[in-house]
Image (cartoon, rainbow, N blue to C red):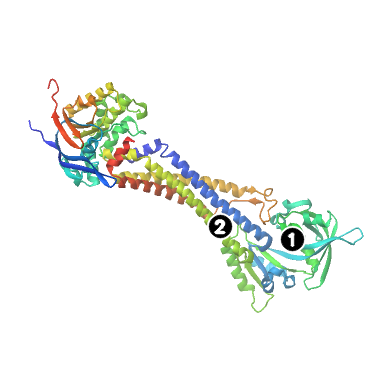
Amino acid sequence: MIRFLFKGLLRDRSRSLLPILVVTAGVTLTVFLHCYITGVLGEMIEFSAKYTSGHVKVMTRAYAENKNQLPNDLALIEVNDLISNLQKDYPTIEFVQRINFGGLLDAPDEYGETKKQGIVGGIAVDLISENSKEIDRLNIRNSLVKGRIPEKPNEVLISDEFANKLEVDLGETVTLITSTMYGGMSIQNFVVAGTIEFGVQIMDRSGMIADISGIQNAMDMHDACGELLGFLDMANYDDITALNVENTFNEKYTDLNDEFSPVMTRLKNDSIMSGYFDYVDSFVGIIVTIFILAMSIVLWNTGLIGGLRRYGEIGVRLAIGEEKGHIYRSMIYEALLIGIVGSILGTLVGLGFSYWLQEVGINVGDIMKSSKMMMPNVFRANITTPAYYIGLIPGLFSITLGTMLSGIGIYKRKTAQLFKELET
Amino acid sequence: MEQSSIITIKELIKRFPVGKGEFTALNGINLAFNTGEFAGIVGPSGSGKTTLLNIIGSLDTATEGKAVVMGQSTGDLTTKGAAKLRRKHLGFIFQTYNLLPVYTVYENVEFPLLLLQMSDSERRKAINDALEWVGLTDKIKSRPAQLSGGECQRVAIARAMVKKPEIVLADEPTANLDAANSHNILKMMLKLNEELKTTFIFATHDDKVIKYLKRKISLEDGKVVKDEIIKIKGD
């Protein structure tokens, strides 16, 4: 009997192939959307991590309390020793020095007099060490508009818009007027090696990227930096690992009686990012739930229609002497079979697309040129564990539930009514 | 020779709810059918023929009175009991054939036997016999869509007859057939009735069918107005 029914299922494409294709398509979309949203939002978090917060960030306790003011007078000192110790304690985490600074950038004329000047906000990173990953991490190479990446400590990149405003060209000198770590005045000349487009309005208006050694020299911050950013050895931020690192670090290095002792915060604790994390979690949850619900309704409907259009066949089977329960169960087994096959196929296809998008990504650099948001140029999907089972919700449960509901009609309707529907 | 009744209907009433009121489809029917009868319930549309056939076939239940089929009161049967009665003792032939379109002729005829859990060899023999009765042994691999209307109805007859039921209920079996096919089908059923002693009960208003009946029960407005035995020439 099972073989007989299975034969009928295989032959009737409107009962097998079509629902399987619908389930496969629904599950593919669900899995793909889940991976894509998770990936895109994860990329945005990662982008912010690369620029400002790292996966973990080490500062002095005093700096941390006033970090919005970027107080370099409260910077970490003896940083090289600290990094050596951290490399022993956390060999899989890469720690890099960062200094965020502000000041006045002066563009002199041929007589050395001020031609133009403007307020500058800059970031100092390791641009010239052989093993530095900062250029790739900050996507500097792709953001260059003119010139080249600095090769000497006294070379800088400034935003293209800022360069035009100051009327400075490549190879010309600009003067950074700022304060030293100890509160003194600092006036330091830098050569413009290139111009850059950040893609973020505030940074494009007055942004500057300098080599860390050049800024340390200018701000009298030898063996000191404002922040140490730590990057976990994984493609995407993992809060559990970061929390563990944060706890062990603070237990070992933080002294509550010393405001200059180092303290570590993780990405999720960052004042800007904490809200964003909650937003991302809710956003992914809401979008994926809405989509799963929509797909569930579609697939439920498929199950329902599939059941309803078989009332005639059910009438014949009842007339011949098959029991209602047997017919009902056979319909559910069919739906389960279709749901399983469709879910497996859909998950495989969805994961395939997601894997491709994870590896290749979609370059939105050109489209997002005018964006005011700080976001990466390439959006990638991210295959996470839920992607392997999330498709089962619409794929398996919905179509089975739809079939079960439509099958209730077998019990609710009198046999003679089903029998009558043979004639329609 | 006195024959035993395999169907007894006593004071049967069937009412259907219509809006806030009720419609009486069958009103005080008393009938008995003996083994091997070739009988027809005839009457105009709405006279209650199909309703009576449904109650005899345990597809519907009476509002009052009772119908006893093969010794079992259909009103007292559970859905499982009714399914068992249909599975073992009843065969149905429909106006629109109602073959399962994805199965071959052989498989359509096989279906009732699968429900009876017959062995492979028994099943094969029974199907071949049934297809031989209706003259379709050369079409066993065809699907219903590849057959003519007459051939489809012959498959439906083979499906109803394959388990050799005591009773076959046929609701307007010739309504979709031309005259030649109708006569062929009826001759075939008459032959099976005579050879296998199967009781045939038709619901019909087709003169072509009425011509073949050995007993004609006329129904009007849910009541039996005439019940006559028809003598066929030569009998």
- The chain letter under disc 1 is A
Q: Name the residue furthest front.
A: B20
Q: Quadrant of residue A71?
A: bottom right
Residue A99's image quarter? bottom right
Most extreme residue toward the left is B1
Answer whether residue A149 is visible to the viewer in this image: no
Q: Nearer the viewer, mark 1 or mark 2?
A: 2
What residue did someone put label 1 on?
A: A126
B90 shown above or below A131: above
Q: Residue at x 23, y 25 (%)?
A: B207
Above or below, A51 relative to B96: below
Q: Position of residue A97 (x, y in %)?
A: 71, 64
Q: Position of residue B112 (x, y in %)?
A: 27, 36
Residue sitting nearer the eye, B20 or A10: B20
With A311 as the anchor, is B61 left or right in this view?
Answer: left
Residue A283: which numbered mark, if any? 2
Please state if A275 lies on the left or on the right of B20 as rendered: right
- Is A262 or A333 nearer to us in this picture? A333
**Residue B103 visible in rendering:** yes
Identity of the residue furthest to the right in this view: A111
Give amino acid for label 2: Phe
Quadrant in which the C terminus of chain B is drawn? top left
For marks 1 and 2, give the CA distance.
Answer: 35 Å
Badge 2 local density, few (<14 within 10 Å), some, or many (20+)? some
Q: Identify the mark nearer the N-term, 1 or 2.
A: 1
Estimate the x, y position of residue A234 in percent, counting from the top left.
61, 58
Query: In the figure, residue A114 lies in which quadrant?
Result: bottom right
Which amino acid lies under the numbered mark 1 shown in the image of this protein?
Answer: Asp
What is the chain letter for disc 2? A
Q: In the structure shown, which secondary structural element does the residue marked by tag 1 occupy?
A: loop
